[in-house]
Image (cartoon, helix red, strand yellow):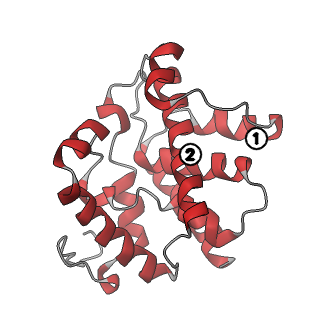
Amino acid sequence: MLSGRRLDLLDPSALDVEIADIAHGLARVARWNGQTAGPHVFSVAQHSLLVEAIGGALNPALQAPERLELLLHDAPEYVIGDIISPLKNAIGDAYRSVERRLLGAIRQRVGLPAPPPALARLVKRADRIAAFLEATRLAGFSAPEADAIFGRPPVLPESVRPEIEALLVPRPTAEAESWYLARFAALHADT
């Protein structure tokens, strides 16, 4: 890690987790294997910001800790990479076990409990909506192709569309990292 911490992937310690490392790594991990158009990849940091915005649109009553759970949902990928879903499914519980331990250490570091089932379902739903939007807007999927994989998303409120549109533009790495850190800081200050 850039912070000098050494994170044991099999037995991660919350003391070795640094949000700056997470933001740095997620801004450099490409979604869609980097096969999106334009001069910049669409990073997992941007995806995480998009999921948090969508989750907030689906449930405007969410408090800062719940929104932080949405933002951090893919945080383990800063060290294990964005392994695409079919590969995750093939590896099965071995991958999920490592991911769960890392996410547990991250939650402990920032003072978040494990999410209740309703919040976990919201994270999954927002993640799938984000994937549909990314697939159709950035990765060349047709709407029917994406619908078959991710399901057709609901129409989101008009008030959040400008934010979501802005988040769907692949950004330079430093900008994605900065946005992620800023959003984390804003949410964490309210927890």
Residue 22 vertical placement versus 3 (above, below): above
Residue 164 vertical placement versus 19 (above, below): above
**Do residues under tags 2 and 1 come within 8 Å of each other at their CB atoms?**
no
State the residue at coordinates (55%, 54%).
121
The answer to whether residue 175 of the structure is visible from this angle is: no
Count the marks.
2
Viewer-proximal residue, 114 or 77?
A: 114
Distance from Cα at disc 2 to Cα at disc 1: 17 Å
Q: Quadrant of residue 11?
A: bottom left
Amino acid on which disc 1 is placed = Val
Amino acid on which disc 2 is placed = Arg
Q: Position of residue 9 (x, y in %)?
A: 19, 70
Viewer-proximal residue, 13 or 34?
A: 13
Residue 147 vertical placement versus 40 (above, below): above
State the residue at coordinates (53%, 16%).
143
Q: Position of residue 171 (x, y in %)?
A: 49, 38
Determine whether, in the image, residue 147 is placed left or right of residue 37: right
Q: Position of residue 112 (x, y in %)?
A: 52, 78
State the residue at coordinates (46%, 22%).
148
* Residue that badge 1 annotates: 160
Image quadrant holding the N terminus, namely bottom left
Q: Nearer the viewer, mark 2 or mark 1?
A: 2
Label 1 packing within 10 angstroms: few (<14), some (14-19), many (20+): few
**Furthest residue toward front:** 117
Instruction: Give me the disc on residue 187.
Output: none
Determine whether, in the image, residue 23 is placed left or right of residue 96: right
**Sequence-wise first label, 2 or 1:** 2
* Residue that badge 2 annotates: 125
Q: Secondary structure at mark 2?
A: helix
**Furthest residue toward bottom:** 15
